Image (cartoon, grey):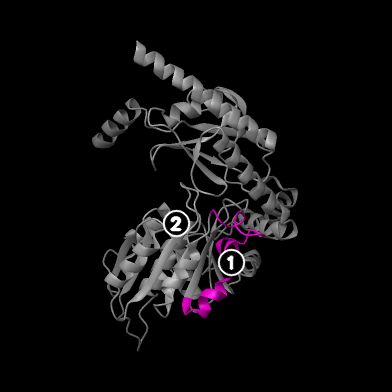
Amino acid sequence: MQVVKEYVRRWYESELDPDEYLCHQRQGNMVEIEEAETGKRRTVLTFCTNDVLGLTQNEAVKQAAIDSIFQYGTSNSSTSVLSGRIDLHRQLEDEVSKFKHLPHTQLFLNAWMGMQALMDAFCHLAIPVPGFEHTRETLIMTDVLNHGCIVSALAHAGTRSGKLFGYSPRVRVKAFRHCDMEDLARKLKRYAQPGDRIMVVSDAVFSMDGDIAPLPEMIEILSNYPDSTLLMDEAHATGALGKTGRGIYEHFGLKPQDAIDRGINPLILSTFAKFGASVGAAISTHVAELKPLMNCSPTSIGTCSLAPPLTAAALQSFREVQKEPELVSRLQESTRYLRSRLAAQGFEAIGETNVVPVLLPPEMNPKMYARELLDLGIWVSPIWFIAKPRIRITVNALHTREEMDQLVAGMVKVREMMYKQEAATISA
């Protein structure tokens, strides 16, 4: 442990560790937080929650979670495969399938587990079956900026979970440049071999850049590879993209059936931690045979199933957004407004979604910038240890124009103050 102790000491000395805050209560976008190091409490306006439609505070969603506890208890205390499956799981899977226009859905505790289960199911199938020999290699192409859950699963894709050594055919993973379809097409031609099972994996909305994957071009490229598979991670797309929040396919005026008609197998990973007022994930497909393989993967067999209140909250969230699609249009309108206000003040906000990363000049420390904003009563996420330095702002459907104006005014004030401090340091 000596190495760990020395590393963390240097880490703290270099001020690379993130500031820690504890939330005590929330009303709308006003939250009472406690600074973990000092115990200081304050009420601030938050722009760092992924509750994109504000459904964590929706009365129907909260009541559904409460009711489920009285019916099922707080936990299922078993895996789905054994005795932990409840009717709420079936209802949620059916609701996700209807929302995503893909008939078969499998639930998971989180996206990391869902991605690993998919790799096990797709690349390695399940268990040896008499008379069946798995001989075809798998080629997986991944966007270089994909989320960590994808990267982690692909790093372990060569061996089925629970095994130190793999006995399945080889899995080859190659990266293509971010949203660069010429590079994807070029690398598919370079690396694809006869008999390969091909999968392309991409975030729909990239969580640190706020941009959108070019889905139509991806479908066009993969149409040249019959029976190829296209997995879209819609963690930040569900509830945020498309007229009714159904995600990237709706955003581009498409449905998964359009990919199927081109000979492509569409897969959609949905998560409930952003749009769904809960936690958990789901993978949807039109291939019925894939679902039992994911359900029998080590990540599913070895883990307790999604708890009743989490399942109920996610289920009610899907129902609420279908009853109130104006939540989605409100979110999209607020996103456009905030981005226009930031641009008018000379801030470089990249991307195009409600995830609004603002790049700061190199001389401005994002951590210090966020601390100064917090002193003005505004809470944003400084990013410096998992991506290029930036301030990450997330807009949600509850934000008012007055609140967004307050954010921009605060950012301008902090920028001016930090420039003055920099000038004073240089002159000294």
Magenta stretch encompasses residue 107: no
Q: Nearer the viewer, residue 344 or 380?
A: 344
Q: Quadrant of residue 101?
A: bottom right
Residue sitting at x 56%, y 53% = 279
How far apart marks 2 and 1 lie (CA) works out to: 20 Å
> Circle 1 is placed at which residue position?
85
Q: Which residues are magenta?
A: 236-264
Residue sitting at x 48%, y 49% = 207
For the N terminus, the image quarter is top left
Question: Of helix, strand and loop, which one carries label 2?
Answer: helix
Q: Nearer the viewer, residue 168 or 265?
A: 265
Tell me the crowding category of disc 1: few under 14, some 14 to 19, or many 20 or more residues within 10 angstroms, Cα based: some
Image spot of residue 25 (x, y percent): 65, 34
Tell me the crowding category of disc 2: few under 14, some 14 to 19, or many 20 or more residues within 10 angstroms, Cα based: some
Outermost left residue: 3
Residue 353 in the image: above or below residue 420: below
- Residue 33 seen in the current view: no
Q: Which of the two marks, 2 or 1, is nearer to us in this view? A: 2
Image spot of residue 318 (x, y percent): 67, 59
User: Which kind of residue does numbered mark 2 sit on?
Assistant: Trp
> Circle 2 is placed at which residue position?
112
Residue 424 in the image: above or below residue 74: above
Of callouts 2 and 1, which one flags the residue occurring earlier in the amino acid sequence?
A: 1
Q: Nearer the viewer, residue 293 or 224?
A: 224
User: Which kind of residue does numbered mark 1 sit on?
Assistant: Arg
